[in-house]
Amino acid sequence: MLEVVALSALTTFLLGVGNGAAGEIGKNLTLSAGALVRRTLGRETPLPAGAEDRRALADRVHARLGRDPHRAGEWALLMESLPDEAAEPSQGSMPPAPWGFTNRQKVLKRLLREADRPWEGRPRVVLLSGPPGSGSTSVALRLGAEGRDRFPDGQYYVDLRDDSGESGPAPAGVLLRLLREMEVELDRMPSTESGRERLYRKLTAGRKALVVIDHTTSLAQVRGLVPSTPDVLLVVVVSGPPLLLEAERVAIPPLTDRYAKQLVRKVAGPEHAERIKAQLPSVLDRCRGNAFALHAEARLLARGEPEHVLRTSAGQDHPMRAATHLASLRLGPEAVRLCRLTALGGWPSISAGIAAAAADVDEASAARLLDEVVDVGLLEPLADLRYRFRPGIRRQLAETAASAYGVRECADAVDRVLDALLKRVLPASRAALPESWRTELPPEFQVGPGMVPDGIAALAAEVSNVARAIVVAEEHQRATTVLWLARALWPLQLKAGYWDEVLPALRDAARYAEENRADERLAGALHFQLAHCLGEMGRWEQADRAARAAVTYERAAGHLRGEASAVELLGLLSLNRWLYEEAYERFAEAESTYRRIQDGQEGAIDLPRAFALVERHQGRALRGLGRLDESRRCLENAVDFFAGRTGAPPEAYNRARALMDLAETLHDGGDDAAALVKIAEAEALLDTSSAPHRRYLAGLRRRCEEGTVR
């Protein structure tokens, strides 16, 4: 069977394993590969960190397989279990181009020229830049609308504006958003930046596609997206000075007076042509060819705004500032106040709840006022009744808030939003994980059952605002708010895989806890969350440091359950790196720490379940060590517990996972008939939401069936 295991195929497999699909199924495949590497080479071999190390490992394994046909057959079967990363991507959904698009034909021609030129090995990349409000986004969207025939295999648009940080998402986060636009399923989404870049290149290879990354703020965000295939055009849009990117540079010039008039007439409508004719010269003078400002003034002209009102914006240092000033004049005092106070804090997205808290009004009034603000162009509507400010508009409104209402009222507005976010996300966190001690709440934040119907959805809607709120709360010296906001994110990272989204918040909160000598239990919990997040993203050394810090804090607090849990996490980090001996030692230490909890002490009621989980982990580590009989006994005990045979309530999902592990151990030991029985039991326990587990079990079944034939 050696001919099936070509060196190139083995190398591809090892590049994908551990760097590929996230979640439990990706980990299972990684552990199976690690166990097989140990059996093949006869010694423990840590998971290689980089591509070159994985290629070297593939060379060593392949050399052994030439002398061991049976082992070669095992590798061939395992390699067939690797999920197909390069499933057909969706065609994307580019937003529509603005209806009033005017005279950017020269710019569009330059973009299309880059798409159509001879490739000659040179990547097709355009850097499209212009000052805020110049219409760079509109040009990119118009390119998509006019270039559908040129890019029949997909048009993908990613807007980086809604991130919680001023510098936007990290490169891994940009890749994540792009792959989501391609509709890559969660269980197939690589957890690491290198894995995501590899998948992006697979999905675009041989395809004619357009990729637009809007509101880019750094070269690092797009460096990994530069296409290596001749028919993909990458358009990087920058609102401001261009980046130092090797690309065809296309600047967006101001609209000439001729086309500025056309734009104003289009937006205002032909029915207002005579009335606005006399005011056009002064509008052109104020807007200076800025597309956003021209849109804003055209809307005001269509409303019949008198010339003396429009002239009040004259003398502003930038057309967008003039347009913002004019739009504010169109609002009543209540709407202006809400608009300005909501702009404080730099919230990535605005809901009626956030606006109501900022302005200290009820949500119904806030929703009505937000509609008015959208109507004059100061807010952009998003999905699910949420909104956002353009960065320049937000800054200007925040500046005017300070001068109009004073520092104290502005600070109070921000504090009210922080309080509103706490009241929103803490109950949502508890609703998402109602039985977990990691989501226990202070009494003032507890709500009745069913008050939050979907905790995960509520947390996901606010995750960027929470990350921003942690920074703002630190500035306002609200220590408790910093720590509890970050703790509320635990269900998102555990159940929904929002690692990229929560990582900045966890880093900030953990650092703050260290610097300010925060409550040791809270500090331990935050470092645990940080370690878990980093581990899921394959950042092993950082995760290990954070987990060890969690152990130290929990031990100092005398919190045995937290200490044992953090030690257990250290074991999992070792397990996922193929350090099986070290992992087993950590799991044994965690069990020993759990056993120090006495009846009546905190966490005592959860001990039977904790022992079952840690015994399952011990069984997985023992499998990696080749101690298969011991592994089987541990896993059988875990299966019995989660089946309810020891008196505890049955847990179908955890029982299925333990059965899957047991089947792997039985297969490694050559008892494929028994393994097939366990696979059937596991499949019967999984519901329709467990498609990734079912796919993995199907691959494991094929391996076992082949084993029974041999």
Image (tube, grey):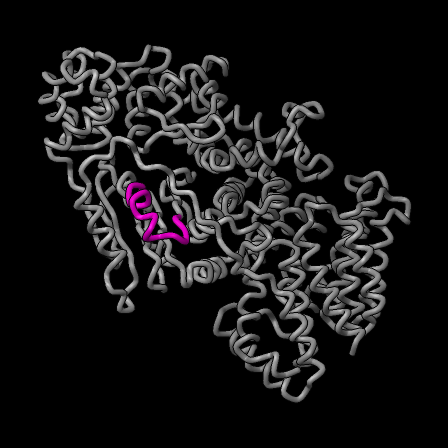
Q: Does 696 appear in magenta?
A: no
Q: Is residue 514 left or right of residue 567?
A: left
Q: Nearer the viewer, residue 468 or 123?
A: 123
Q: Nearer the viewer, residue 469 or 352?
A: 352
Using the rendered view, name the quadrant where residue 616 is placed: bottom right
Residue 76, given in percent of the width and then of the height, sits at 65, 75
Tell me which segment is drawn in magenta: 141-155
| Residue situated furthest front in the rendering | 149
Asked if residue 398 is positioned above or below residue 508 in the image, the reply reads above
Q: Residue at x 41, y 51 (%)?
A: 154
Residue 142, given in percent of the width and then of the height, sits at 29, 41
Using the rendered view, name the quadrant where residue 240 is placed: top left
Q: Is residue 37 left or right of residue 93?
A: right
Asked if residue 356 is positioned above or below residue 188 in the image, the reply reads above
Q: Residue at x 78, y 63 (%)?
A: 663
Q: Nearer the viewer, residue 599 or 247?
A: 247
- Picture quarter with the C terminus: bottom right
Q: Is residue 690 left or right of residue 482?
A: right
Q: Residue at x 66, y 80 (%)?
A: 72
Residue 246, given in percent of the width and then of the height, sits at 25, 59
Residue 202, given in percent of the width and then of the height, sits at 46, 62
Q: Residue at x 69, y 78 (%)?
A: 73
Q: Nearer the viewer, residue 362 or 238?
A: 238
Using the rendered view, name the quadrant where residue 661 is placed: bottom right
Asked if residue 635 is positioned above or below residue 707 in the image, the reply reads above
Q: Is residue 623 left or right of residue 146?
A: right
Whether residue 529 is visible: yes
